[in-house]
Amino acid sequence: MAYTFDWSVLLVYRHLLRQGLLLTVEISAASMVLSLALGGVIGIGRRADAVSLRWLCGAYIEFFRNIPLIVQLFFWYFAVGLESFPAAVIGLTVYTSAYIAEVMRSGLQSIPRTQIEAARSFGMTPYQAIRHVVLPQALIRVIPPLGIEFINVIKNSSIAMTISVTELTFQTQQIESMTFRGFEAATAITILYVLLALSIVLLMAAIERAVRLDLRVG
């Protein structure tokens, strides 16, 4: 029997799609900001002179990167007892920050150490050398892989439905269960996720152009 599409169900239940999309954006945006801050600190710590600090940062990366995200979400939600939204944000943050830390470490490591030594010879402190010499150059190199990690955050946010977060995937399944229109619901969610990913690509491209222009002007 041929399947007859009925796209009107998306208009009838558009409020569910809107609510799910909004919650997905909120979770993803919060996780991106927090994981970038935490991952940046951990990544810089991986390049620290202190062996103990490098070991701790490395242990953090290996621990959170090798535990499945769904397990981490279950831990924060069931074991710790957080509400679904903060549990999802914290779980996504610590998981993603481990990958961002490696991205930052790779970007910092790509800068020749001779540049740090040259900056120190001009009287800069280690912090000033990193802030004014290393980070601006490393930032340009890590923007593309950071964009990939941010897209992964959006995709991974769908796992939050397992801890009762009514994000986009959860609402799409609700529509399917009420209307038995799985193909229409799946098409809608696919388009919305593609648009979210495309927005990240465009945003990161704009940031990269702005950073390159700033460096040339400076």
Image (cartoon, rainbow, N blue to C red):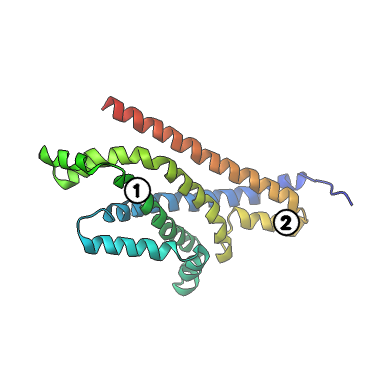
Residue at position x 29%, y 56% from top?
A: 46
Q: Amino acid at mark 2?
A: Glu
User: Relative to residue 10, is residue 196 drawn left or right?
Assistant: left
Q: Nearer the viewer, residue 179 or 102?
A: 102
Secondary element at tag 2: helix
Q: Nearer the viewer, residue 172 or 96?
A: 96
First reached walking from the N terminus: tag 2 or tag 1: 1
User: Relative to residue 162, is residue 48 drawn left or right?
Assistant: left
Q: Amino acid at mark 1?
A: Ser
Q: Residues within 10 Å of mark 2 (few under 14, many from 20)?
A: some
| Whole-percent x, y for residue 32 in the image | 43, 50
Question: Do the residues under discs 2 and 1 have CB atoms within 8 angstroms?
Answer: no
Q: Which residue is mark 1?
A: 106
**Quadrant in the rendering for residue 197:** top right
Residue at position x 45%, y 34% from top?
A: 205
User: Relative to residue 125, is residue 176 drawn left or right?
Assistant: right
Is residue 80 shown above or below 9?
Answer: below
